[in-house]
Amino acid sequence: MVFRKLAEKAKAFDAFPKVEDDNQQRSEKGGILTVIVAICLFMLTMSEFTDYRKYHTNYKFLVDHTIDNKMQINIDVTVAMPCPSLMIHVVDATGQRNRLTQDLKLIPAQFSAGTATKYKQIEDPKYIHEMIQAASGKPYDHGIANDMGSCRIYGSLKVNKVASNLHITSDGHGYASVAHTSHDIMNFTHRIDEFSFGNFYPALVNPLDNSIEIAQTNFEIFQYTISVVPTSLIDRWGNFLDTNQYAVTDSHKAFKEGQTIPGIFFRYEIEPISVQITESRSQSFMHFLVRLCGILGGSVVTAGAFYRLFNFVWTGGREDPKLYTPTHNMMKGV
């Protein structure tokens, strides 16, 4: 009884008064408008939900306070020269020189502008065997490697986090070596499938990825000058990733024998600033609900106002007799 009395008193505060079904008049125009409005409201709802799911990326520039003395380089380069003829070194600003031929994997391949072919002929199993041997770090037949004519250099390595120069040269040209590469097979045409610093993160753009350079002579130098920017990423879930981005300028030049060292040179420097990338939603869930309610409610009210205006113009300002129930019908049963 108490709840019933409270409910009766609550009727006085009803802000949404109802109209009896007997006093309502439905029409074909109203039905068509209802369907159109429902479709529009569904499309608006999906648009708002899609916008709510989007994440925005915020950038902040900071002074680099990292004290790491090592940096990871990821490389996947195919050179149009046999693997036994190639040498890879890193020379840093401290004067330290490291030979990396043993740290990276050098896999015999055939050079193509599209993607590396890991064996010369599919029907010849000896090339597949040599590929497996090379990929696992075991000795392989250098004669077959020379016959295939190209070399895929790939792997990740740790280097000092200072300005350095990564060289890809040939035996007997540039550094002291017992072997001497014949000028006939010297060809520093190369394709870069991957060249990056540090760990990967979504939407990372590496300018050198999927690039190719063609050598016109046996003695050419290809140089890439790289500015490395330390980068940290904080994703939408609060996870932290420390990596690097870079910008690059490239050049190449042909010369005569003995003028300079032919090869591929990646010269990189570490910038003193860092970039912090933070992912966040474009709006909160409450903001999404408020926008959605405002859009849907406003659309319904606006559609109703246009419908009443259309009826007013259509009837010339006269009251539509169909909207009213005749008196004798209302008096039935009295």
Image (cartoon, helix red, strand yellow):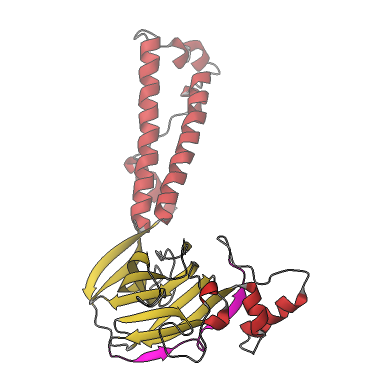
- Viewer-proximal residue among 291 and 105: 105
- Viewer-proximal residue among 212 and 57: 212
Q: Residue at x 53, y 77 (%)?
A: 153
Image coords of residue 156 (percent x, y): 48, 81
The image quadrant of residue 256 is: bottom left
| 290 relative position to 131: left or right | left
**291 w.r.t. 303: above or below:** below
| 171 relative position to 225: left or right | right
Image coords of residue 17 (percent x, y): 38, 35
Q: Residue furthest front?
A: 257
**16 w.r.t. 101: above or below:** above
The image quadrant of residue 11 is: top left
Residue 242 located within the stretch drawn in magenta? no
Q: Quick check: can you spot residue 227?
A: yes
Residue 97 located within the stretch drawn in magenta? yes
- Viewer-proximal residue among 71 and 82: 82
Q: Residue at x 39, y 17 (%)?
A: 310
Image coords of residue 86 (percent x, y): 51, 81
Q: Quick check: can you spot residue 239?
A: no
Count the numbered circles shown. Answer: 0
| Residue bounds of the magenta highlight | 94-111
Image coords of residue 47 (percent x, y): 43, 45
